[in-house]
Amino acid sequence: METLGGLLQQARERQGLSLEQIASRTRIQQHHLQALEEEDFESLPAKVFVKGFVRSYARSLGLDEDNALQLFLTSSSNFYDRAQEEQQDIQVTKQAAHRKQFNWNLVVILFVVLGGVLFYLLPGQQETLPPTIEPEAPLLSNGKSKEAILEPTPSVEDSPVSVSPEAAVDPPLPLSSPSPSVTPLSPPPASQELSPILPVSPAPEKASGADESLVLEIEATQLTWVVVQSDDQPPHEALLQPGQKVTWNANTQYLLTLGNAAGVIIHLNGQLQGPFGKPGQVVRDIRLKS
């Protein structure tokens, strides 16, 4: 049974062409061409772009593009079906993990709410401190408390003990606590004023550079692949998602290949370029220069 890889490789070898020569013709990177011949679909970009690769490769060899595309669809059907199933399994796993995390969060929230409700509904137990019991003053033999002895003018007649005048103890004089000397802080002189803050003048803007260059901006509105060659530099290939924007700089010109001509918005030095084609159309050798 004829396969896509065998068809392309045999036709290329019959014509004595190398993969490097085919890459120069089609603007497709060499490792992508090799992956097509080896039917290594895992090393290729999305299916919609690989279709464009197959058509370009077949056209460069003078083969029937529709036949080559049909061989590609037959050879890659199992791979892309399996990839789609794996993607669906990943989505299901992510959704299940999200639901599990949501359930745990809900349980935690319910516990917190329930705890708050119980805290406010149950009667609060107020902690009552035991009353402070002051120790009673010891009684003397005549039944008077110690406080009576400490009075400033005790009565000698009330005391059953005879005390000689020499032994009489004068009542204690109240101790006067020395008041600490506080040195008042003198306020700062009124003449001392803060120097005003001078406004900062903005830095002068840099003059526009004298070096003129071509700035290429490509913004993807749909999924597309592009190949950009700046001046005499090697071409660069990029797969752009919707909303993605890339920028290149060159001195003289650009040479573009668009995998989806209507899926990009292109500006050169701020000026809108195009349109270049219809949705899904592959357009090559678009030359942009000042």
Image: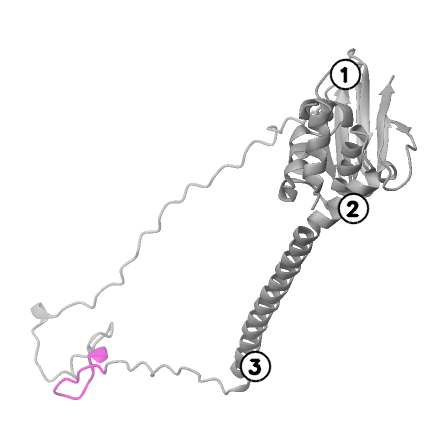
Residue at image position (65%, 56%) is: 82
Does residue 243 show up? no
Query: Relative to 111, does residue 290 appear above or below in the rendering?
Result: above
Query: Relative to 286, does residue 105 appear above or below in the rendering?
Result: below
Residue type beneath disc 1: Asp
Residue wearing tag 3:
117
Image quadrant where residue 34 sits: top right
Kind of element beneath mark 2: helix
Residue at image position (72%, 44%) is: 46
For the residue carrying disc 1, how many other residues have a C-alpha within 10 Å: few (<14), some (14-19), or many (20+)? some
- Mark 1 or mark 2, earlier in chain: 2
Cα distance between the residues tagged 3 and 1: 73 Å
Report the disc number at residue 231.
1
Q: What coloring was used for the rendering?
A: one colour
Asked if the residue under mark 1 is in contact with the one under mark 3, i.e. CB atoms within 8 Å, the reply is no
Kind of element beneath mark 1: loop
- Mark 2 or mark 3, earlier in chain: 2
Q: Position of residue 150 (x, y in %)?
A: 22, 74
Report the disc number at residue 1.
none
Quarter holding the C terminus is top right
Q: Is residue 198 magenta?
A: no
Residue type beneath disc 2: Gln
Residue type beneath disc 3: Val
Residue wearing tag 2:
70
* Segment tinted magenta in the rendering: 136-148
For the residue carrying disc 3, how many other residues have a C-alpha within 10 Å: few (<14), some (14-19), or many (20+)? few
